Amino acid sequence: MSPYLNVPEIFGSDVFNEATMKQRLAPDVYGAWKKCIQTGSSLPLDVANEIAEGMKIWATEKGATHYTHWFQPMTGITAEKHDSFISPSGDGKIIMEFSGKELVRGESDASSFPSGGLRATFEARGYTAWDPTAFAFVKDNSLYIPTCFFSYTGEALDKKTPLLRSMDEVSREAIRILRLFGDNQTQRVTASVGAEQEYFLLPKDLYAQREDLRLTGRTLFGAPAPKGEELEDHYFGTIRTRVSTFMKDLDEQLWRLGILSKTKHNEVAPCQHELAPIYSTANSACDANQLIMEIMKKCAAKHNLVCLLHEKPFACVSGSGKHNNWSLATDTGKNLFSPGKTPRQNAQFLVFLAAFVKGVDEYQDFLRCTVASAGNDRRLGSNEAPPVILSVYLGDELHAVVDSIVNGSNYTDPEKSIMRIGVDVLPPIPKDTTDRNRTSPLAFTGNKFEFRMLGSSQSIAGPNIALNTIMAEELSKFADILENAEDFDSALHTLVCDTFTQHQRILFSGNGYSDEWRQEAQRRGLSDLRNTTQAMPSYASDKNVELVTKRGIFTESEFRARNEIYLEAYRKIINIEAKATADIALRQIIPAVSRYCAELANNISVKKAAGCSCKAEAALSEKLSTGTDKLYDLCEQLMKDLKNTPTGNVEAANYFSDIIIPQMDAVRAEADALELITDKCYWPFPTYSDLLFY
Ligand code: ADP
Ligand code: MG
């Protein structure tokens, strides 16, 4: 790392971005690429060849020896396979070669990626195709080409393909609404996303001593440290030197890759931090978030740290999430969730707002399912995390506007009996830059929505596919009504009014953590899906299947395949956690406690012989011995139950959440109680105090 960093100079220097393309490619080639991404048409082979050649020269100058098609399979992380540029030149030497065909299309073995039954066993091949809307980049001596991943029969095996489809859909339907408001200029509406990433950093040597962290990414054991978050001394606190050196290095690497890393700060929990980039298109934000997560891990290792992206690494300490800021913007630079100044702009804003509110209400379950995972089950609904019940927080001002629309009263002028949408002006809605209601899962923050239920380790593709698709669906229904209206203004007024009236139940401003809200939500008929196994049955419900197939985001088999994959991932994770729990308890904790008991017994006999009292030793011995016996029995039971796991995906997932998880938690509770009365010298691995307050 150089002491002085010329940020404008290094920013994007490892990306084959628009400026570089313009500089490196012949004008007609550049023009053809530009036209192809604007119209969504495919690239002619001669143009692809020219681009590939330009890319190769640029990449080899940057030290690249290989290229890779980079894709996002349904594991939620990225995949890559590297081929070198070398090609024999006949004289025992080689030349560096890269063709348009190699750029545009690749073949890879799909059999090792989850396909949820999409990939027939006789056809294990998968194909990758360049996504020309995302830029290639150089990293670790390879040219990375962002691609879509699909099967021989054309079914999407990845997260990028449906995301791109959903972006097209929402653009098309949003434009229909804009045309009704006289906007004939906008050609494309883009879903914009800024994903704030939370993470933990731990010293590598301490991490290495904990098998649970190494195998599962979270602590399966650990009594709470005497100190927690109660002093509120970590959030926005001074960043310690080791961490700030890491952050500086991380920023530099991200900037080189053209990632707009903007904000970094300490989070609520000790050792917890956050990185927020400036928002970009949903597609590029999704690629960027994958790179952020990957580079965070690699960069941490370089600084003798370990980056934990698990949603709940520590019990009783805040978990990590991802705040997904989402909005829609036109290619003419307008944010469609900006209330605007004139009655006309206000009316258009209210249409988009009403569509959003309606969509979230009607597809609560869909959104809920996109954030369901074994890790997030531990986080949602506890310490600083949003509850599992979906609701929308609008802020006081906007909520009052909606109330006045619903009640037929006038917000600005109580003298006038009713507010006319498209005629009256809205009161100023502050663009909120603070977390005004941290308990809300989905909050309007002035010109965007912040979806806060996402887990820190998950791909942001799923939730954004859902947001785009839901929005496209509702806008399309609105457009059908408004396009056919005889009197546009009165149809508009009725539509917005009726929509808010019918979907009020999803709006909530109070404390999302309270028990009262859970009861109130139940009265309102909102769904309260507490964990992955409760949520997933509604994922591929008829309603959702109809939505995604009608909008062309997934075929029915693609969608059902995802359901299978998520359940399978869930059961595999719980299976590993359960086995690790028993293993650590039996082979590390029980032996350690037993050794301590032996020392106590020895001390008791020595002290007795010397005529001393041994009340404490005797009492501890007794507690430790009965505790160890109980722990042993619980482990035996857990292992026995694990052997009886049913085979089917759904059955196994249910069995895990009903039987195995409570068993694991019981083992942990017993072990944590032993930790509190065992001599620290005997405890086999670093404790919460060691890890969190190093
Ligand atoms: P806060 O820190 O209060 O959560 P900010 O307004 O600074 O709020 O933004 C947080 C994230 O939201 C950043 O990633 C930012 O780039 C992103 N963001 C801001 N405006 C938009 C928008 N119109 N659409 C999508 N994301 C946005
Ligand atoms: Mg935020």
Image (cartoon, grey):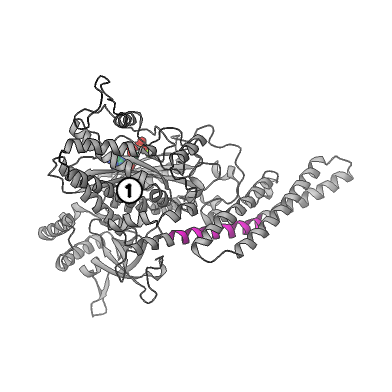
Q: How many marks?
A: 1
Query: Can residue 457 be seen from the camera position used here?
Result: yes
Residue 670: % across, % down: 67, 49
Rendered location of residue 576, percent (x, y): 54, 60
Identify the amino acid type marked 1: Leu
Q: Is residue 651 left or right of residue 19?
A: right
Residue 361 higher or lower than 538, as above or below = above
Residue carrying label 1: 467
Q: Is residue 587 magenta?
A: yes
Magenta stretch: give its range: 565-588
Ligand 2 quadrant? top left
**Looking at the picture, does residue 512 appear above or below residue 61?**
above
The residue most toward the front is 486
Foreground residue among 89 and 605: 605
Q: Answer left or right for 689 relative to 233.
A: right
In the rendered structure, the answer to whether residue 104 lies left or right of residue 526 reads left
Question: Quick check: is 210 in the magenta stretch?
Answer: no
* Residue positioned 49% across, 63% down in the render: 649
Residue 257 percent location from the top left of the image: 30, 52
In the structure shown, which secondary structural element does the residue marked by tag 1 occupy? helix
Placement of the C terminus among the 4 image quadrants: top right
